[in-house]
Amino acid sequence: MAAAIETQNLTKTYKNRSGKVNVVDQLNLSVEEGEIFGFLGPNGAGKTTTIKMLLGIIYPSAGQAQVLGKEAGDIGIHRSISYLPEKPYYYEHMTGMEILKFYGALFGLSDTAMYQRLLERVNLAGDQHKTISQYSKGMQQRIGLAQSLLNDPKLLFLDEPTGGLDPIAHIEIRDLILQFREEGKTVFISSHALSDVERICDRVAIINKGKIAAQGKLDDLLRGGRIEIIADNLTSEFAQGLKLNGATTSFNAGRLIVDIDEAEDFNGLIDGIRNAKGKVVSVLPRRRRLEDLFVETVRNLQSQGASK
Ligand SMILES: Nc1ncnc2c1ncn2[C@@H]1O[C@H](COP(=O)(O)OP(=O)(O)O)[C@@H](O)[C@H]1O
Ligand SMILES: [Mg+2]
């Protein structure tokens, strides 16, 4: 598959009170066509700055980036990409439909039937004559997504698209993003929260202080290496036997909780529980939290730096 985005040592330097700082620091990213790529990192990590360089809104201080096979900033790409900023600003007095007409005109479009279809897609057909000032935050994000589809882009940049939304609105936005992938679009989505992206991203990069801390499949990055099994109707003698075999066990309200290494034979353990007339309640691979991964990878980076 071709790369939708590639960067080589992409760097942006800003001056602050303490001197020059690389807010994006030698970033090497590779995003495949057709994937949903999560760009994760805490506030201030450099996510928005990176997106702006990829869009050609600001220039890199060093390094390069290619978007859809052209140098970032090449005007020719603009027809094939779109961007939903972190804090989109809309004219409050315009209605949903008027917003699409307004931005559509910027692309030289005047296709009311298409606007209507977009409004239906983002579930705003019934609210298209309300003004933006009457829209909830979730509705504003959805009109933003409709607007970002106006030019039928191949590649979408969504900067924190679920920031500040309630759980229902989160799900609506996530479902829409999944549909984009179904249509073969590439989606580059930034977020500071793991829960936003963990169920939809094919791959992620985690950045911190402008540097990539980790890149790969989220499942691989967050694999905890342990499995938790919860079961009913078991005795403390049974638990004792497991402990002798290296498992960690505890009881909570009469339920046995067993924590074993992923490499252990957990199928055999489940057989053992059943043979002892126990009832398996759940088997859960334990994933690490994004926060833990941040802390760990940042420490690794620092210790690598110290040993140089
Ligand atoms: N125009 C600018 N001038 C100086 N510093 C900036 C500018 N834009 C962003 N920064 C700084 O760069 C860092 C990264 O910002 P940003 O890319 O917005 O992070 P994120 O989107 O990950 O929250 C922050 O420390 C921010 O203060
Ligand atoms: Mg940002």
Image (cartoon, rainbow, N blue to C red):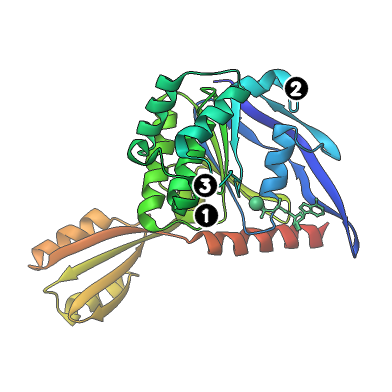
Image coordinates of residue 223 in percent, x first then y, are 45, 53
| Residue type at tag 1 | Gly
Query: Which residue is disc 2 drawn over?
Result: 74
Q: Is mark 2 within 8 Å of ligand 1?
A: no
Tell me if I can see residue 174 in this picture. Answer: yes
Label 3 SS: loop
Q: Is residue 93 above or below residue 253?
A: above
Query: Which residue is disc 1 drawn over?
Result: 163
What is the C-alpha distance between the residues marked 3 and 2?
Answer: 25 Å
Query: Which residue is disc 3 drawn over?
Result: 161
Q: Mark 1 packing: few (<14 Cα in 10 Å), some, or many (20+)? A: some
Which of 86/200 is in front? 86
Image coordinates of residue 13 in percent, x first then y, are 85, 48
Pointer 1 and pointer 3: residues touching (CB < 8 Å)?
Answer: yes
Name the outermost residue toward the left.
277
Residue drawn at point x = 55 percent, y = 47 percent: 92
| Residue type at tag 3 | Pro
- Earlier sequence position, callout 1 versus callout 2: 2
Label 2 SS: loop
Q: Is mark 1 within 8 Å of ligand 2?
A: no
| Residue type at tag 2 | Asp
Q: Is mark 3 within 8 Å of ligand 2?
A: no
Image coordinates of residue 86 in percent, x first then y, are 60, 48
What is the C-alpha distance between the residues marked 1 and 3?
Answer: 6 Å
Tell me if I can see residue 202 in this picture. Answer: no
Q: Quadrant of the C terminus?
A: bottom right
Q: Mark 2 packing: few (<14 Cα in 10 Å), some, or many (20+)? A: few
- Earlier sequence position, callout 3 versus callout 2: 2
Q: Is residue 57 above or below residue 219?
A: above
Q: Quadrant of the N terminus?
A: top right
Q: Which mark is residue 131?
A: none
